[in-house]
Image (tube, rainbow, N blue to C red):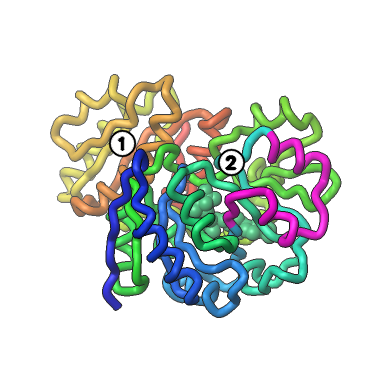
Amino acid sequence: MITKIFSLNKENIDEDILKDAAKIINEGDLVAFPTETVYGLGADGLNDQACQKIFRAKGRPSDNPLILHISNHNMLYNLVDSISEDAKILMEICWPGPLTLIMKKSDLVPNTVTAGLDTVAIRMPSDDIASKFIDQANTPIAAPSANTSGKPSPTRAKDVFHDLNGKIPMILDGGSCKIGIESTVIDCSEENPVILRPGYFTYEYLKKIIPTISLDDALVSDKKIPKSPGQKYRHYSPDAKMEVFIGENATKIMLEKALKYKEENQKVGVLTFEDSISNFEDFKTISFGSRDNLSYMSHVLFTALREMDNVGVDIILAEGVSDKDLGKSIMNRMKKSASNNIIYL
Ligand code: TXA
Ligand code: MG
């Protein structure tokens, strides 16, 4: 199969391209598209066969459910059995945007989407291309991140092409994703909402809106099994090995390690903040920007991991941040990328 990439200008979206993309969806095939978080790999969310293609293209385990993306509230009512008061408040404040809500599913939702669960994940993206694409297809779009399972999520069309070239007919290129890490996932199917995956909307922020909200046990202790099936898999992993360093002495220890690996003839890549980067002139570096700008760090994280693989480093030494606010969401990804190889200094 030939994979075609079509560039779209956010200021002036070409309707003909969107119509072609929607036609592919309505015919039961796959289209990758940009959202404000990461690129999604879309199929008609009401077409079981089409959704199965997503699992095949990504090599995704079949017990990992998909998110249905909608572009207006009318689409929601057919997909869910009931909507809690807390879910209504969260939708009101955070939609359209990087928030996914888990609710009891209706009979309309195919089993492939929910991986057999009685709940369904729903998100209304704020990205204009995503929203207009869903409108045009006139059906909820099932979409996981558009990467090969286990790899870092794609934040650019070329990342999608790298992973899925030859496996899908079309990629809509809307440039680089604004946020760069995936949506916050909240289970609203039971009495008190539970955060299953931290994202752009942080625990601290959400707690102010819904005081009874809590974090899934697995986000607090590594020993607990996550409630979200997708959270238990190896994830966000670059080809290179990765080690993460956190604390005051991070730069010093990273430099020692970098020199040691270099002596062993390993090609080293370093991810750190702009105030430390000049210490690593002998190595491939990518900057996380300023230490007080975690939004930039989340925006650049997955891109940086993929760039390190593109230049073929053997080992990535990355500086981490403390586990609060957006730092919690960033560290959730970094810990998995590094297979929990985290060194606190
Ligand atoms: O930002 C995002 O959420 C992106 C963009 C494309 O919208 N999508 C995304 O999808 O990250 P994916 O499939 O990579 O992650 C969805 C997560 C997985 O961890 C999955 O297990 C969980 O949501 N999930 C989906 N349905 C669920 C359900 N019914 N119950 C619990 N977890 C669910
Ligand atoms: Mg994913």
Q: How far across and down, in percent of the image, does residue 238 sit?
A: 35, 54
Q: Is residue 215 left or right of residue 287?
A: right
- Towards the viewer: 54 or 173: 173
Q: Secondary structure at mark 1?
A: strand
- Towards the viewer: 96 or 250: 96
Who's the residue at 72% across and 49% down the image?
187
- State the residue lying farthest toward the front: 16
Q: Quadrant of ligand 1?
A: bottom right
Q: Which residue is mark 1?
A: 271
Q: Which residue is mark 2?
A: 96
Above or below 26: residue 252: above
Above or below 281: residue 46: below
Give the CA distance from mark 1 to mark 2.
32 Å
In the picture, the quarter occupied by the N terminus is bottom left
Q: Amino acid at mark 2?
A: Pro
In this rendering, does residue 242 appear at all?
Answer: no
Q: How far across and down, in percent of the image, does residue 119 sit?
A: 74, 61
Q: Which residues are magenta?
A: 69-92
